[in-house]
Amino acid sequence: IRDHDQDCYEKRLAFLREAEHKINEKYGEHTAVLTITESYRNMLEVMKEHFYIVEKAEEAMRTVGVVPATVPIRGGTDGARLSFLGLPCPNLGTGGDGFHGPLEHITVEAMETVVKILVEIMKHPGEKES
């Protein structure tokens, strides 16, 4: 189940649980068995509590001439998993483009820009903006 909104996620989960119940009610106990294994959730739940990290990354981007673009994504990312393991970790991007398609690519120049962004972030690690 994937959703950007926790309430919508819970509604989808409730729908699946109700479907399991109705199938078992109609066709007999254990005809349907719903197993939920959580792999990741929306990292915004964690990042809201540590938003200064996002602001620091955005400032680093502006410093090197990149216009920050914050867009929701649905994919299971390392950043999402790490955030829920206690390391708030927004996705900064790699500089790549056209992901998961025949035109997926990355340039050396884009990777160099990402390195510059990381260097800017690390100039003041752990400092919260006032």
Image (spheres, rainbow, N blue to C red):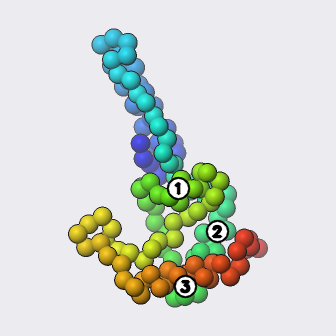
Task: Give the image quarter of residue 103.
Answer: bottom left
Precedes in sequence: disc 2 or disc 3: 2
Amino acid bearing label 3? Lys
Amino acid bearing label 1? Ala
Measuring from the top left, give residue 104's x and y in whole percent: 29, 72
The residue carrying mark 2 is 53
The residue carrying mark 3 is 116
Q: Quadrant of the N terminus?
A: top left
The residue carrying mark 1 is 80
The number of callouts visible is: 3
Precedes in sequence: disc 1 or disc 2: 2
Q: Quadrant of the C terminus?
A: bottom right
- Above or below — where is 33 with respect to 56? above
- Of tags 2 and 3, the one toward the viewer is 3
Measuring from the top left, give residue 14's x and y in whole percent: 45, 31
Measuring from the top left, give residue 63's x and y in whole percent: 58, 87
Q: How far, Cα to Cα, is label 3 from label 1?
A: 23 Å
- Mark 3 lies on a secondary structure that is helix
Label 1 environment density (alpha carbons within 10 Å; few <14, some 14–19, many ≥20): many
- Mark 1 lies on a secondary structure that is helix
Label 2 environment density (alpha carbons within 10 Å; few <14, some 14–19, many ≥20): many
